[in-house]
Amino acid sequence: MSITTYYTATSLDGFIADEKHSLEWLFRQDHDGDGPLNHDGFFARIGAVVMGSSTYEWVLRHEGGRWPYQLPAWVLTTRGLPEADGDLRFAQGDIRPVHGEMTAAAGGKDLWIVGGGDVAGQFADAGLLDEIVVYVAPVTLGGGAPLLPRELDLQLEELARNRDFACARYSVVGPVEHTDSMSHGGPRSQ
């Protein structure tokens, strides 16, 4: 059975891109490409990817207009986008049929939500997000694109350091269930 993973990096204050949609802050951080929770090890198990329109445009700019993925890719968008050579499918609306198509195309391999946070949130809203792998960079941005603009309960499955990054893998438990923490022995304000 395929696992759907949101694998990304974030600033310490929870942003995946700064207010100018730049990732310059990320690329100046040191990491070990063979270290814990590394991209190549993760990517080896991926059979299909999905991303939003802003991530798609960033990838094209960053790759000089070339499409870097040699596997089926979905781009969620409500606007016209430039096309690139590759196995690309543009979609909008309900995420459930997209997930079904991705799962079929992945041939038993896993699914990667490349970005952004709202795309991962749509999968979470539909109960289709299984895990989150996040690299936390030692930088704060003060604003930008949020990591995941949803309230989710997660369970820590793996925690490591990869040079400059704190790395964590979480399984998704589900939406946050709100309770009155004062009456249930939770944290108390002073």
Image (spheres, rainbow, N blue to C red):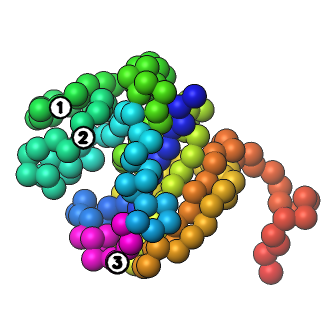
Mark 1 and 2 residues: CB-CB less than 8 Å, in contact?
yes
Magenta span: chief secondary structure: loop
Viewer-nearest residue: 105 or 25: 105
- In the image, is 39 to the left or to the right of 183? left
Q: Where 43 falls versus 81 (above or below)?
A: below
Quick one: SS at disc 1? loop
Q: Which residues are magenta?
A: 24-33
Q: Is residue 25 magenta?
A: yes
Q: Where 127 falls versus 31 (above or below)?
A: above
> How far apart are the two marked residues, 3 and 2, measured between alpha carbons?
24 Å
* Sequence-earlier tag: 1 or 3: 3
Quick one: SS at disc 2? loop
Amino acid on which the number 2 mark rests in the picture: Tyr
Residue 104 is labelled as none
Q: Position of residue 3 (x, y in %)?
A: 54, 36
The residue carrying mark 1 is 86
The image quadrant of residue 52 is top left
Q: Position of residue 102 (x, y in %)?
A: 41, 26
The residue carrying mark 2 is 69
The residue carrying mark 3 is 30
Look at 48% across and 52% down and name the residue there: 148
Q: Classify 10 Å Cα crowding around label 1: few (below 14), some (14-19), many (20 and above).
A: some
Amino acid on which the number 1 mark rests in the picture: Gly
Quick one: SS at disc 3? loop
Mark 1 and 3 residues: CB-CB less than 8 Å, in contact?
no
Q: Position of residue 108 (x, y in %)?
A: 48, 27
Mark 3 and 2 residues: CB-CB less than 8 Å, in contact?
no
